[in-house]
């Protein structure tokens, strides 16, 4: 059974540019959530989608956005990149029910902003 | 707001020297407490989910336990390959917690041969 797949694994962008990251959840999983991981702040929740609807959002500026498609695949977009956006972006998937769901993470996308 | 505190921040053990990692939490209705292992440059690898006080789960040299305020990850006779960062996270039941894991800062475990 394939795990959570994230692409690209590594990318370098320039300040002011925008970036789109992609996530394919485990087959059958309908919930996809995104996290930002930095050495100083640890893992911080960005947003969560279930059946194409955003159910929850973390405390990040509007430059961070996401969406989910009918096949449960998800993308997140960061516009007007800043140096502080350099981080490991992690996608996680689960079945999305109210309880008893294991949450699995992908290997992440390493974003460097220069 | 849900909060998770892990201790110690770093732990150095000799191979075979058993120890425990602590995870203290406050949450508005616990829907699950998760333990993950993270190796450098990789995503978190799922270890355990605990749902209610008194629950215990084991996997190889690892055993996770849960009380109403904290969880412990016990490592028995560790090996160098157990070296990693261990992350604890909670999934709450409150309206603003839905679908959101709140993580601790992690414990960096180093096991020397």
Image (spheres, rainbow, N blue to C red):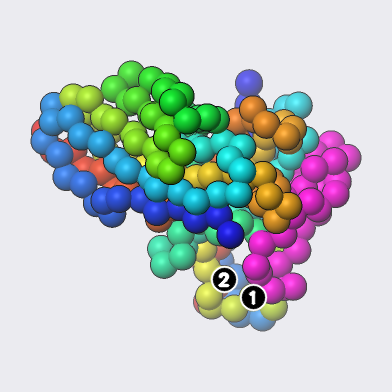
Tag 2, which secondary structure?
helix
The relative height of residue A30 versus residue A1 in the rendered view (above or below) is below
Residue A89: quarter of image: bottom right
Q: Residue at x 26, y 51 (%)?
A: B8
Dot 2 and dot 1 residues touching (CB under 8 Å): yes
| Residue B100 shows up from this direction | yes
Please name the residue shown 55% across and 62% down the image.
Answer: A111
Query: Residue B52 location in percent, x, y?
Result: 52, 29
Q: Nearer the viewer, residue A67 or B63?
A: B63
- On residue A85, the disc is 2
Q: What stretch is highlighted in magenta?
A: A48-76
Which of B63/A54 is in front? B63
Residue A64 highlighted magenta (yes or no) = yes
Distance Cα–Cα, label 2 vs label 1: 7 Å
Tell me the element at label 1.
loop
| Residue B3 in the figure: left or right of residue B87 | right
Q: Nearer the viewer, residue A45 or A114?
A: A45
| Residue positioned 77% across, 35% down in the render | A30
């Amino acid at each position: 059974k394939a795990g959570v797949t994230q692409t690209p694994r590594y990318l370098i962008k320039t300040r002011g540019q925008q970036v789109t990251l992609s996530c394919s959840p485990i087959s059958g999983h309908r919930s996809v959530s995104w996290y930002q991981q930095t050495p100083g702040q640890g893992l911080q929740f960005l947003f969560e989608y279930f059946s194409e609807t955003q159910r929850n959002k973390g405390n990040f500026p509007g430059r961070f956005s996401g969406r989910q498609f009918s096949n449960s695949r998800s993308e997140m977009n960061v516009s007007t990149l800043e140096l502080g956006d350099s981080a490991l972006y992690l996608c996680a998937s689960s079945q999305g029910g109210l309880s008893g769901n294991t949450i699995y993470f992908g290997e992440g996308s390493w974003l460097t902003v220069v | 707001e849900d909060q998770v505190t892990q201790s110690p921040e770093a732990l150095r053990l000799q191979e075979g020297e058993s120890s425990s990692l602590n995870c203290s939490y406050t949450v508005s209705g616990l829907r699950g407490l998760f333990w993950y292992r993270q190796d450098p440059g990789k995503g978190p690898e799922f270890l355990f989910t605990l749902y209610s006080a008194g629950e215990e789960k084991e996997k190889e040299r690892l055993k996770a336990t849960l009380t109403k305020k904290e969880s412990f990850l016990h490592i028995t006779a560790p090996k160098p390959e157990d070296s990693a960062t261990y992350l604890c996270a909670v999934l709450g039941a409150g309206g603003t917690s839905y679908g959101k894991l709140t993580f601790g800062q992690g414990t960096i475990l180093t096991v020397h041969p």
